Image (tube, rainbow, N blue to C red):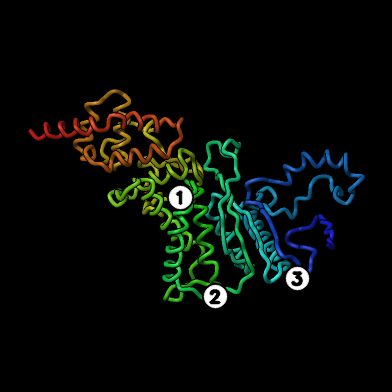
Amino acid sequence: MHRTLIVPTAQQSSATELPYPDEYFDAVFTDPPYYDNINYSALSDFFYVWLKRSLGDIFPELFTTYLTPKSKEAIANPSRAESAEEARKFFEDMLKKAFKEIARVLKPNGMAIIVYTHKSTSGWETLINSLLEADLVPIASWPIHTEMKSRLLAKGNAALASSIYFVCRKLKRVETGWFSEVKEEIKKYLQDRLEQLWKEGISGADFFISAIGSAIVVFGKYREIKDFQGNRITSVKLLEYVREVVTDYAVRQILHNGIAEELSPLTRFYILWRWSYAEARVHFDDARKLAQSTGVDIEKELGRGFIKKEQEYVKVLGPQDRKLEDLEDSQELIDILHKSLLLWKTGMKEEMKKLLASSGWGTKESFYRTAQAISETLPKESQEKKLLEGFLSGKDRLISEVKNTGQRGLF
């Protein structure tokens, strides 16, 4: 049996100027940079200086510069541009050029595997637009657990644990899709996909990102999507719809039953935030988009309750971060729950029962199911989780006492 020995070769070149002819490769695999997440060239300098000393004579063509080359690095680094906006634009332009080069060197029936993860939806908008402009159409996407929870980047931030692997092909795309029809396609496709992701244990922010990856498979096959007035629908608008579908599904799953309809938008937002980000802070734009998907205008809520802004980040306060006097007049479920937890914590049990009776929440199953759902989303070391578990441990007896308190108040 005759065997052909294939000798692999490695070559250094720019991803935006590949030194290969058109339609040359059967497959291309790449894991592009993610905006400003990591400055790879600066990080590489530490190793470069030592490699240059030990290997510079053997591979002189790789060590001609004093430090690693940086001018063409595809990254959003404001220190190399006139502004943060210019740095962002530079990265996006480089990403588009790289994807177009991949499409150029890929055979007509070839496949491109692209790994991407970014918790910002603006990052996903760029990826989607860049892929589709290059006519690289995702035909499948899979979340794969790749990141360590203990890494420094994850401390106190809403860092992702999964990367999305896109399988793309050079396909002829449908010229026009109609928004109302595409929305139905997305909803139908996501119903099965979300069920699968849930069963696989994908949760929180990873669940949203995985759903976005799945949705691209649907709307990516259209070159342009319009409404019936002829207006072009952007990827931003499409992602807003995807978030609405995913939010509705996630809230129902978190609550384990059909009480989602009984909850206000603000309560739904709180539950979804705890499930998505636990107690981490999140960039304002992503917090705004999550709030929007539940029907909450986050800008109106800032400073009025549990939503706090810290520079460009947003944090959702737990009961331990709030004061009783700030919760006096609210009848919102979450505020009543937080106030009850604070009264329980300080031993003011009679005041807690009166609050639960007068608000009407103390005898409603939806109130306790919401508390239980929030508890289940939080890590074991969470102070809020410990308060919730303690409060819920005597739930049946508490409901009975609240009913008696309410009846006494009638006479």
Q: What residue is rendered at 49% in x and 71% in y?
A: 225
Residue 265: horizontal and vertical position, in percent?
34, 50
Residue 151: horizontal and vertical position, in percent?
60, 37
Cβ atoms at labels 2 and 3 below 8 Å apart: no
| Type of amino acid at the residue the image marks with label 3 | Asp
Query: Which quarter of the rendered picture does the C terminus lie within?
Result: top left
Residue 138: horizontal and vertical position, in percent?
58, 63
Q: Label 1 belongs to which residue?
A: 198
Label 1 crowd (10 A; few <14 / some 14-19 / many >=20): some
Residue 227: image tag: none
Q: Label 3 belongs to which residue?
A: 22
Q: Label 2 belongs to which residue?
A: 174
| Type of amino acid at the residue the image marks with label 1 | Trp
Q: Secondary structure at mark 3?
A: loop
Which of these two is toward me, 141 or 183? Answer: 141
Q: Which residue in the rendered view is the most extreme toward the top?
A: 347
Does residue 344 lie above or below 105 as drawn? above
Which of these two is toward me, 383 or 230? Answer: 383
N-terminal of the two: label 2 or label 3?
3
Label 2 crowd (10 A; few <14 / some 14-19 / many >=20): few
Q: What residue is rendered at 43% in x and 61% in y?
A: 241
